[in-house]
Amino acid sequence: MANEEKDSVEYYSLLKDFRAEIEVQEGAFFLCFWLYLMSSTAFPARLIQVQSSATEGASFLVLSEKKKMVLLPLGILHKEAPETCDLTSLSEVPHVAMETEFPMEKWIHIGCEVSSDFVLLHIDGEIAGKKAMSPLFNKDSISGGLTKITLVCGGGDDNSLQGYVHNHKVLPLTSSIMEYYAKDPPLQLSIDNSSASEIEEGSDGVWSIVGGKASCRRIFSLDVVLLDAFSHPINKELEVIASLVYADNGAPVEKTSDGEAPLLASQDGVEFASCDRPSKMLHGHASFKLKISQLSSKCDNRMFRIMFHMPKLETYPFLKAFSPPILCISRNRSTRMSSRLWKRPASANDQLNLSQLSGLDDETLELHHSSIHEEKLSPSSKRCRLGQEDECNSHSRTANQVKNVARRSDSLEELDDSQTDSESPEARNSALKSTSSSRNPMSDATIFKYCLAGLTEKTLLLKEISSTASNEELLSFSHQVSLYSGCSHHRHQIAMAKRLIEEGNKAWNLISQNKHQVPWESVVFEIEEQFMKIAACNSRALTQQDFELLRRIAGCQEYLAQENFEKMWCWLYPVALTLSKDWINTMWSSTSPKWIEGFITKEEAETSLQGSRGLQESGTFVLRFPTSRSWPHPDAGSLVVTYVGSKHTIHNKLISLDQMFSFAEKEKNAKPLQDLLLAEPELSRLGRIIRSR
């Protein structure tokens, strides 16, 4: 273990300690290194400067006021060398600059090739800029007389320059930068969002987790993954510890008044202080089942974060991973409502301006086109987007009403029909009469239990109901849930429940042959056959990368148990059902262009939009299925468009498929989805997913 830890970090050093002594050959040298800059780094900033008898203090590598990396020639006379990193003083001095902003808190490989004839800047193995030196400049240059220089950090002692360097090398002039770029990449610890469960996420990006007393708190799951700079999982025998800290200052959260640890790890039904139960990494992943015992309300309503780190390596910020801010609430507290009001344009001709939506990942994108008629929504319509359980509240009850329902859990047969702020008595009574007049085998208690339940409880409830209910009864139940939850997005998941469960059981029985677990390699063909049958597509098979993602979702390694299969099936079945729709099936079957390039994670999609010189051009997008949405999540099987926005930032927007399908059914001449996407103002070209083989 000690050797593994040493191998992982022996080449990491603080940027302020950077020092490279270079033998200059005929006024030229070639230097490369990995650089990680903290977001707190002040800019403009002189990152590296030259120290020699003639050019002491001259800037060599700087971060401009626009956060662009700039490389300066070696041979600038001391009197011309800029003593600050203000590029306005470089108007007469040749230099090379990146075209885009330098990414913060991400490992970037930098290559600096300098000679008396040119300067060349490499970013992540590719040329970011080249500048030829004029004969006039060379005449006044002193580089030809240099035989040895020393490069050091130029940040001074004010701690404004915060970063790390990994594996800096002085290369032979004939070297290939790609050889060293691919060799010994640095590592970074990240949260695997595809593994999260039982976590609600509000429109402000804050997680809501039910915690507190032992009888109330819920288990939630989360994985972290150790990746190299190319987003490849690294198999190292390391341990990871989870702890709870305050979101505002990173200080540890105190124990509860009962002396209980604020964050608990659950193993085999037994709770332990999370700091006493590290999780071992397996194939680069460490899995956690956690509970929070400390409530935000007991801590002045402050928010928390979960910090993951590896023992003895916690001094390196890139080997830590932090969750989004967390509001830990009690079970009786109502779900936080979105502060964002989602309204559709007044007419169908109005297109959705993506830039007006907030930058939250996986928000709803409703596509509009002149050939599609808009449906009328209630004036109070709103969509509350949650990370693992999407509670949609169109004409939902007020917080007090939800609390009343929760308090009366033993007598839910009596419906609370008090008036809400957004409904008239006539409208409410009409809805109730319509509901009560129809055949409804499900009790009000069952309906309210489903509306208030977490994702795991919804799954168990649907399994129980589907075992005896007919398809018609499930449709009626889905209507009731949609009415009382104010969310039409539940209908699709409830309606597919019976078929999903029955076909899943048949598939598992066929795969397992009454065995408790089966080798993963022996089941991939059966999984693919089931997928292609449901998706109604025989022209496109699943790839090895697709199966790897399915295995990660299943949470298994070499062997697949029924529990793992059900996790995978609850994600795969809604995806296959979506692909069976004509609009999506055509896109999935298309190979040129390939509109949907298999099963990918959010991280892979975002990485594909980041070229060697920074982000690709604005409007570039890729389509993916969100890996954090499994049945019966309302958005299971939906599509997400990941794209580069107008301000060169990456956005993730959830496409409202239920709206789209209803449009497609009503409009015989509805345009294909790809045409609707390209009609959006901020989507202009399809990107490509570059996947390692």
Image (cartoon, rainbow, N blue to C red):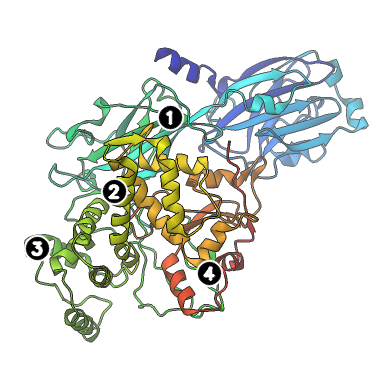
Residue 104 placement, left or right of 660: right
- Checking the image for residue 185, the label placed there is none
Badge 3 marks a residue whose secondary structure is loop
Q: Badge 4: how crowded within 10 Å, few (<14), some, or many (20+)? A: many
Pointers 3 and 4 in contact (C-beta within 8 Å): no
- Sooner in the amino-acid sequence: mark 3 or mark 2: 2
Relative to 450, is 540 above or below?
above
Residue 558 pos. (x, y %):
38, 31
Find the distance from the CA under tag 2 to the CA under tag 1.
Answer: 23 Å
- Sooner in the amino-acid sequence: mark 1 or mark 3: 1
Badge 1 marks a residue whose secondary structure is loop
Q: Amino acid at mark 2?
A: Glu
Find the distance from the CA under tag 3 to the CA under tag 4.
Answer: 42 Å
* Quadrant of the image containing the C terminus: top right
Q: Amino acid at mark 1?
A: Gly
Residue 275 occupies quadrant: top left
Label 1: which residue? 284
Residue 437 placement, left or right of 534: left
Q: Is residue 151 visible?
A: no
Residue 22 placement, left or right of 624: right
Pointers 1 and 4 in contact (C-beta within 8 Å): no
- Sooner in the amino-acid sequence: mark 2 or mark 1: 2
Label 2: which residue? 198
Badge 4 marks a residue whose secondary structure is loop
Relative to 174, is 554 above or below?
below
Pointers 2 and 1 in contact (C-beta within 8 Å): no
Q: Nearer the viewer, residue 253 or 682?
A: 682
Q: Amino acid at mark 4?
A: Leu
